[in-house]
Amino acid sequence: MSGTDSCDRKDLFEEQRRRDRDGRGADGVQEGGQTEEHLGNRRRHRRNEKGPNRRQSQVKIRLSKRRLLGAAAMTLAAAALLTGGFGGVSSRYVVLSSLPPEASLSSSSSSSKSERSGRPKFAFDPEGLSSSSSPRSLLWSLLRDPSSSIANLVLPRKLSLTIHGYDTTQERPIPPFYDHAANVWDTITAEDQPALVHVPRAGGTTLAKLMSHCLGMVTASKMVTMDPNQNGLLPYNTLAINTHTVTGARYLNVDPSTHEGLDRAVFLNAVPSRLADVVIAHDLQWSSPLYDSVHRSRLFLMIRHPVKREVDQFYYMQRSTWEDDYDPAIASMTLEEYAASDKMVENYVVRMLLHRTTEEVTPEDVETAKHILRRKFLVGVHEWFDLSVVRFERYFGWWEDRGVLTNTTVNYCHHRKIADGDGRGDFPRTEPGSLAHKRLAVRNWADLELYFYAKNLFYRQAALV
């Protein structure tokens, strides 16, 4: 074998090894059928395999920046709304002056309430009636004074800044004992006093238990006479918060369910003392002296179908021997006899709203009663009890302040009190076509018309919260 052939074979061998290493056949084409150009593209693709992940990371970074900018913009907008910024937009919260410390009050447990702690407060002011007190100046003073704390600012009620779709007309005259009752759309201040008007057999007792037992409120109510120790009114010459020996509920030592008790509450300045979270009264005219132009009443009530209410009232009066107005004659009556007798107070709710005791109720009285409900009362409907309780709690700010949703104990207590009712038992019902039902409906025609109006009003008052 010549040296030339040996060199040629060596060159061919090296060439073959080089081609095998590069993955190409003898014709310069890749075994998979791809040319060198395709091979180069694949190599570049392998080098850039992490490219999409890198681009996704860049997109996420850009989105995060946008979210941060959006959150910052929303924070600035909220601060501007509160402080009266953005030119024509003005704040709807006013600063209330610090409260003076209570004097000569024998209750020590009441000092924990935020209203009497002397801290500055915000109150909702949709009409801008208190322009002399500027939230902006308060916030600037807080920024200038390091010893001040934003945590000391208390918002007593969370409402929409603007109320839409609610009739606020006031043309029709109403009785003068409503002069110191705030309109439902008026600015709420810390001096306003929530006042439940108790309608018999319409869920008022259940609502009172819910407020005192579940929400821990101090009530000025008939509960003062129900303590087994019979010391609810003590001390008699001054105000005090007492505790029920059985239920643990707290109550003010005045009884607004009687005329004598109301006179005593007025004399002791029960409402200006702000010891009671809610007043539960039965007579609107007699309870009106409790309030004045500064300490206004915030009225709310629960209304029920008048026929159902009268049926329950009849059976309750038959067995309520413990009540002061118990009448043995009713105990021997049938429901039909009661519906035809003068023992029944017909159109009770309209009479209560207008303080009509002996006069006949007229269609004009019904229209005035509707006007009073729309202007002066936050209305609840007994047949929609759960929704009504939520309406009351949200309107007065108890929904957040009392932890209705966040506190499981409070939530469960709500459920139990509503399910148990007033604990007086279930009474028989009447059929809509029965004689008793027809008599009760005819004699309570005004209350029946007012009830259907109140159900419609309940939906419209959703604009208030």
Image: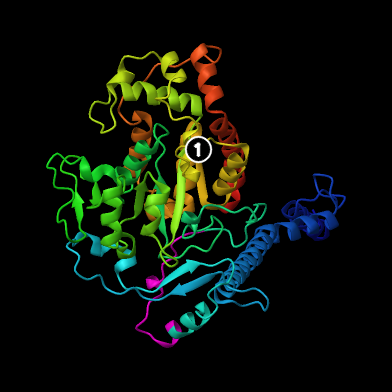
- Please indicate whether residue 170 sits to the left or right of residue 112 in the image: right
Q: Nearer the viewer, residue 43 or 2?
A: 43
Secondary structure at numbered mark 1: loop
Q: Is residue 112 above or below residue 357?
A: below
Picture residue at 19% right of the left edge, 52% below the top: 242
Q: Position of residue 140 (x, y in %)?
A: 48, 84
- Please indicate whether residue 39 sits to the left or right of residue 108 in the image: right
Q: Quadrant of residue 313?
A: top left
**Residue marked by disc 1:** 359
Packing grade of label 1 (10 A; few <14, some 14-19, many >=20) is: few
**Magenta part of the protein: which range?**
142-158
Residue pushed farthest left? Answer: 229
Q: Position of residue 423 (x, y in %)?
A: 30, 28
Q: Position of residue 278 (x, y in %)?
A: 35, 52
Q: Nearer the viewer, residue 82 or 2?
A: 82
Q: Amino acid at mark 1?
A: Glu
